[in-house]
Amino acid sequence: MKIWKKFIGAAVLAAVCGSTALFGQEVRTIRLNNDLDQKYMTTKVYELKHMRCDDLTPWVLGAVYRYNVGSTVQRLNYKAGNKQYLVVTTGVDMMPYVDEMVAKMDRPCAQKDSVGSIVDGTGIYDFLYKPKFRSSSDMITFVTDCKSDGPTPTYNAERGIFYWKDSKSDGSTTLEYLQVADRPLPQSTMQINVYEISENDFVELGLDWIAWKNGPGATLMGWGMDWSQYKSFSDVATDGVGNNLLADSGMGMLTGFMVAPQFDATFLRMLNQKGKAKVAQSGQLTYVNDYDSADPGTTAYTTAPYRLRFTPQYGTIQKSLDSNMNIAVRSTSPTYEFYLRKPTLCFAEAGDKSNIAMFGWVLRISNSVENGNDVGSGASLSGTNANEVYDYTRFYSDTTMALGTEKLLATYTREQKINQNDGIPYLQDIPGLKYVFGASADITNRTRVFVTVSLTPVQPDANLSPWAGEVVEAAKIANAKND
């Protein structure tokens, strides 16, 4: 009622002042502060000497919240200094009552429970767990499967925390199960090593009649005298310094040159070559626990989530047309395709790292055998566009092995024998005259391939490479390994 009287008085006063302003009187301004019974808030920090802040918070919060719903109570547990603080925000009029409540309740007591509380409760505790490595609702499924009774924890996906209420013993058991499930994501680095030992034996013996026909055989009848170079007696009989060559030799007027066909032994085939090569190549891939994924099968390399393919290039010694040796890269090297099926990593007993891996694997080796006759449009049999015939070999199995070890997965042995005979039909079939009327080439190739895998666990605290995120030259890495 008093407030309305103030407003009416202010209105009358404003009207009077306004009317006097018309007659040149002095203008006065009146400001009114309207207090609508507002609660002035303040904040105070209490250091608790004997009582835990978790025990005192519900009592103080219930009191200040009844006074004003905007009141708050915060707990500060400073474990490093072994101190407990309570931060209370409420009205100025309410703060003296909070001071009295804290002073009376925060008192020494010789009787304490296992967690250091001096307040007897109902035996139900609030539990909260924040995972260290990963959080998922699947962890709750793991807890409920292992623990048949008791309340189920609630998972807050936004904050990534679990909370529940239970007795101290049962709640602690739930906490232990969550800590067991909270482990680093199992992952491992797999290195595939391929060792290849190749032996080659080449024997060639006989007469190559094709080379004979295009070489010495083509000019076999070229014996005789060549009179086409004859001009005159003086041109033939006299050299550049005036000496009479024919008179000195006694040949007289018979002039000419004796000619013979060019003859070489390129048609003779007598060669034996032997060689041995040792080649090692490797590739790496990192994988995680993926047992629940779909099995890609044994013939689905392109859809496998963990796959590796590499084609090593081999340096070979070749002889060019001018009989010069040079180093070339062989393009028809084998291709290795390797992929994993449903890899599973198992933790050690302590649960701190992975130590056992179980996985299915598929390895396919493809070798180019020869070029096909169907060269297509614009392609040549000697070019890279010619269709090739491949020899495929596939291995697949399931393996269990310990991390930090190397295991032999498969061995592959291939032996090729090629015999080629070139000669005169029918005559080369005469016993004892095989190498007179033809040439024979025997090529033997023996290849053994060993495929091994080695596993290395990946730890969360593993340091990154010092060159991570940088473009590093190969020479720098080689020098670092040598150091």
Image (spheres, grey):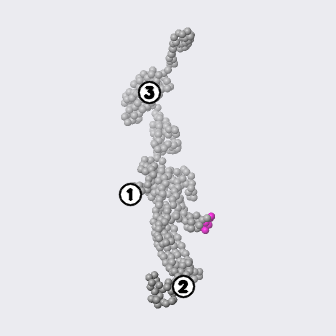
C-alpha span from label 2 to label 3: 131 Å
Secondary structure of the residue carrying numbered label 3: strand
Residue at screen point 51% across, 89% down: 254
**Residue corresponding to mark 3:** 88
Q: Which mark is residue 227?
A: 2
Q: Which residues are magenta?
A: 372-377
User: Height in image: 377 above or below 54?
Assistant: below
Which residue in the structure is indicated by mark 1?
Answer: 482
User: What amino acid is at disc 3?
Assistant: Val
Regarding residue 368, the answer to whether it shows in the image is yes
Give x and y (percent) for residue 11.
55, 12
Foreground pick, 388 / 104: 388
Badge 1 density bin: few <14, some 14–19, many ≥20, Cα 10 Å: few
Between label 1 and label 3, give the one nearer the viewer.
1
User: SS of the residue at dot 2?
Assistant: loop
Would you say residue 375 sits in the magenta stretch?
yes
User: Split into 4 quadrants, where in the image is the N terminus?
Assistant: top right
Q: Main secondary structure of the magenta part?
A: loop
Percent across and percent down for residue 415 are: 51, 69
Sooner in the amino-acid sequence: mark 2 or mark 3 = 3
**Marked residue nearer the N-terminal end (1 or 2):** 2
Give the residue type that dot 2 points to. Answer: Trp
Q: Quadrant of residue 419?
A: bottom right
